[in-house]
Image (cartoon, rainbow, N blue to C red):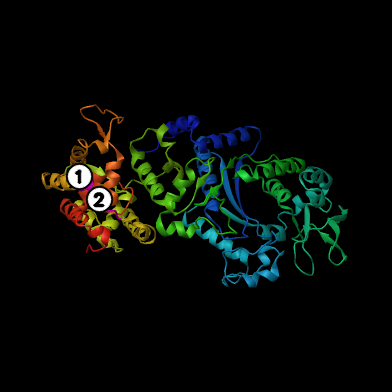
Amino acid sequence: MEPMLPQTLGEAAATSKAWPFEEARKLIARLERSDRKEVIFETGYGPSGLPHLGTFGEVARTNMVRHAFHALAGGKVKTRLIAFSDDMDGLRKVPDNVPNREMILPHLGKPLSQVPDPFGEYKSFAEQNNARLRAFLDQFEFDYEFMSSTNCYKSGLFDKALLRVLECFDEVQSIMLPSLREERAATYSPFLPIHPRTGVVMQAAVLARRLDLGTIRWRDPSTGEEFETPVTGGHCKLQWKPDWAMRWYALGVDYEMAGKDLIDSVKLSSRVARVLGAEPPAGFNYELFLDDNGQKISKTKGNGLTIEQWLAYASPESLASFMFQKPMAAKRLYFDVIPRTVDDYLGSLEAYPGQAWKERLGNPVWHIHGGAPPNPELLTHDEHGPTTISFAMLLNLAAVSNDENPSVLWGFLRRHYPTASPETHPGLDRLVRYAVAYFRDFVAPKKRYREADDIERCVLEEISSKLTQLPAAASADEIQHALYDVARPIPRYQDHSAKRATAARPGVSNEFFNMIYSVLLGENRGPRLGSFIAIYGVDETRKLIDKALANELVNGTAS
């Protein structure tokens, strides 16, 4: 990989169309309007449920903008990334995806940091969820500072900002009340006192304010008892939109992105921040993740993928690649997207060394790895050029072997690439293990072989015969061209609209290859067939064809 040349990198960064650079330019403009010497990024997490991939996505994307900013600023401006957990928020309902739900029910309304951990591992439910989030962020080696809302309120870090909100109480109310229903507006206050007896985060109207003492007076709606509570020291929490604005003011946040469902909330919080005396942070609204049914992923419902589930079948880098692509377009996030995403990442990594800086800065791996992506692990076969192995290829090797042992897949690979091993290619070894796990849990249960019709039987027989005519060390390209020669004369598989197709030499449609995978592997799709046969073996492929023609695969009698 060629060394990074700062001047060349800087020139490319200044004109890059990649979305992290577009976002980073907002921060360059922001710095030019102030005398700030530091840029602060923030991401927010509400630990009312287990962290999901959308939570990780916000941190990953923000980190990508941070790296792009460093490139634009030439590394001369200090930055910080704060991962903020709103763990002083009151628990409104018990999540669907936690054990011991009855343990939590008596604590509804209390700050999440005061709700017991249903898993029995931490002092509170907030600590459990915060630990899960931090564990993943640490695993991905994010450079971040974790902040707990509870700690910030109780330590006094927010005291000055809270007194400022109290000072601007009427102005904050004038912003918030028009956004509320009439019934809610009648009792709304930006301050939520913590009940001194029950510990519940109270929704109560403010009866009086004492700026000199920094207190509010309020009435318990269920008992009628009145209390005077300091707004500082963790005795009160803010409603979440004023709270968001107060954090921006208190921490000096310059950049924070948010989901598209929070557009109106961002506008309101930005107005409150201006009242307090802060410039709202730059940022953008990303589209939401959907589950396989097209429903918004929710951490309280537990639909969609968890962080742990993705990492059982693919690398953190592949997940970051998914997050990089089109952040302002809604995307379904479920198990079926994993193989394609893994191969997209591997393809980007393989392309990177040969790209000019302009293309590199548009390549996801530059952003995923903070400008220093690793070299791709390449395999070499005889005189043929180096190549990589795709996740789809490994899944199909697992499909023909019907084996969950990684060593079986390595047996295929070493036969074609004799110098490769788990020791020389540790990244490929991890990929093999991911593929075996994914095949076991998602591919094998859905495998459905079908019987070949008369035309297809003739085609398979012709393929078997054609393979015997190839040299012993035939390359993947030679095998692929042989397959094309079998398919071209057959009208069913001709594609006259293919590039460079002629009447005498038509292209070959995907239907031809899909037929082979469905009959031989019980799959609808697969990787490049010539490459698959080269690795799996010509003789082994011919034996597989014999089993298909004998209906052993359909009937489940193949051994």
- For residue 1, say whether it is visible: no
In the image, residue 413 above or below residue 62: below
Please state which of residues 502 and 235 is positioned toward the viewer in this rendering. Answer: 502
Please state which of residues 36 and 419 is positioned toward the viewer in this rendering. Answer: 419
Q: Earlier in the sequence, mark 1 or mark 2?
A: 2
Dividing the image into 4 quarters, which one contains the N terminus? top left
Q: Are marks 1 and 2 in contact (CB under 8 Å)?
A: yes
- For residue 229, say whether it is visible: yes
Start-end of magenta stretch: 449-457
Horizontal arrangement in the rendering, residue 102 relative to residue 333 (left or right): right
SS state under label 2: loop
Question: Residue sitting at 52 percent across and 51 percent down?
Answer: 293
Spatial distance from mark 1 to mark 2, Cα to Cα? 10 Å
Q: x, y (%) of residue 51?
A: 56, 58
Q: Is 245 covered by the magenta stretch? A: no
Please state which of residues 6 and 152 is positioned toward the viewer in this rendering. Answer: 152
Would you name the residue on which mark 1 appears?
Answer: 459
Horizontal arrangement in the rendering, residue 109 relative to residue 436 (left or right): right
Q: x, y (%) of residue 55?
A: 55, 52
SS state under label 1: helix
Q: x, y (%) of residue 99?
A: 57, 70
